[in-house]
Image (tube, grey):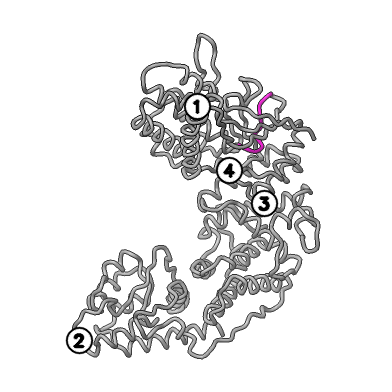
Amino acid sequence: MRFEPKQRFILNIKDKESQKFLIPEYQRPYRWKIDECQTLWDDIINAFYEKKKNKKFEYFLGSIVSFENSNGDLEIIDGQQRITTLTLLFRAFFESLKSEGKKDEFQDDFGKFIWKKIRNKGFVFNEPYLSSQVITDKDKKVLEYILIEDIDIEKLKSFNSNYAKNFIFFHDAINDFKLKNASEFSNLCDTILSDTFFVLCVTCDSQESAMTIFNTLNSRGMPLSNADIIKGYIYKNIENKEEFAKKWQEISSKFEEYNPKEDMSVLFIQAMHAIRAMHNHADSTTPSVLDFFTKIKKNNFGAEDEYLVKQDKIKELMNFIETLVYFWGSPEIYLKEKAYRYFNILCLYQNDMWKFFVAFLVWRNKNNFIKDEFNENFNKEFEIYLLELLKAMTVKILNNKTNTNEIKDLVFKMNAELNQNINFSYSKFLPERFLNNFSSSDKNIKPDARKVKYLLYLYAYLYDDFFSDIQSYKLEVEHILPKTWQNTNFDEWNETSHSQYLEQIGNKILLNKLTNIKCANNFFSLKQEKYKESQNSQEVRDLGNREDKIWSKADIEARNKAIEQALKNFINK
């Protein structure tokens, strides 16, 4: 393996002016956001002022690792976030200078970084040097628009894309600098384009070298995720690279639609635990997902079974990842009635460990999965086993054993038991007066809100035996007894009894946000009119329609007992 590291200033990154920057299929999409751009801009401004004091000052922007492919393009292995962001930055400088209505060398130099230029003809705006094979179709249109000759800044502001947002950030930052430091703007341009900002360019001698580096090197600005590295291993070994790259892009785009805050590593972690379950492995001490798939070691079944090497195993793994993406993105398509209602309750649980069990159910039924279609054969096991998972998770809440390790132990054991087709062994023990942990006789001491919401949501379903759907979106806890004391005694209530009963679970129901706002701090008789209209649950509607217009201590106590008994029956049924 041979490398050629060279220190180069920004305008001289490439060996040949006509070379393109190509972001290859095995790279990750563009991830930099305004925070990273703000840091880069601050660094540039600070370096600019430091350069004024010290003419020899230089600033290191990071490394660019590339490989010259058969077309003569530079495939960017590490540093694509930086190259892309510099392109957006220089495009913003070009646009700012263009708006002044005069051509100068600075505008020309910024443009040469972005587009091909033909002598005596000018820039070829439809041939930018930056090209990405990993960009989504949606982002591709945005980037192409940014890099055309004439752009509408206001139109760009309507695009929900990192490319557009970052370009707008730089455009505004440049104009703000010009407004406040007009006499310094030319000096700033000169500093950026001359001998101040440099990168360390490392050119690899082969694609194999490139992939080796890709699998081991972290960018200073944006570390590779586990999914990125796994992608690199697969890309290196898979026979049909073009098909794989296209499929990965499709999966990645779908994943970002419903989960923009995480990366696809979570799916490979779920795959890891599904594979562990297939080997009946329930140990809660687990390897990292990267080690599991890449290092031959005891219980690293992903590596032992060569899921990133053998063509049939790669296909099995990637088909499962694709199935997970579509399942988690739209579970309402694939789960119906009771299965979907059990799923919705689990979504309110305080951690996501339960998802490993659900992912294993997806694995077991992956051959019955039809993209964007309901299949009763896929749904069947979910209705049976999500009920058991829901019971087991509820027991943990009622025993106040909900930390991550507790739930991991439970879920991994249930996975292995399910794989072996043996009865689940989770405990059904409930302590006496277990609901006391979710009620308080002092309004200033509030029980855990997330756990209370989970139990109220479960009870709303138990109330009508899971007969109908109850939307969980924007549900809020409503205190039936007015939350704020009205400073007036009425019926049997006074300020002391109000404080004693307010935070008891029997005094709480779930309402959607709008209905909850309408109920405000009204008395029960006025709230009933809103309860009647509620689309939340049958219990809320029954409360609205009951003849007794007074909400009493006895009502709260009776409802406490009803909730407790319903939960006992549910666990032991």
Q: Is residue 321 above or below residue 489?
A: above
Magenta residues, as a range? 72-79
Tell me what residue is drawn at x 70 percent, y 54 percent: 290
Q: Nearer the viewer, mark 1 or mark 2?
A: 1
- The one nearer the camera, 195 or 400, is 195
Tell me what residue is drawn at x 42 percent, y 16 percent: 103
How far apart marks 2 and 3 lie (CA) works out to 65 Å
Image coordinates of residue 541 in percent, x first then y, are 33, 75
| Residue pointed to by mark 2 | 489
Q: As shown in the figure, which amino acid type bears the numbered disc 3? A: Asn
Q: Around disc 3, counting alpha carbons within 10 Å, would you say few (fewer than 14), some (14 to 19), or many (20 or more)? A: some
How far apart marks 1 and 3 lie (CA) works out to 50 Å
| Residue pointed to by mark 4 | 221
| Residue pointed to by mark 3 | 319
Image coordinates of residue 309 in percent, x first then y, are 78, 48
**Residue furthest out toward the top:** 120
Q: Secondary structure at mark 1?
A: helix
Tell me what residue is drawn at x 34 percent, y 81 percent: 443
| Nearest to N terminus: mark 4 or mark 3 | 4
Quadrant containing the N terminus in the rendered view = top right
- The one nearer the camera, 456 or 129, is 129
Q: Is residue 564 above or below residue 331?
A: below
Q: As shown in the figure, which amino acid type bears the numbered disc 2? A: Asn
Q: Around disc 1, counting alpha carbons within 10 Å, would you say few (fewer than 14), some (14 to 19), or many (20 or more)? A: many
- The one nearer the camera, 219 or 30, is 219
Image coordinates of residue 274 in percent, x first then y, are 68, 62
Residue 413 appears in which quarter of the rendering? Answer: bottom right
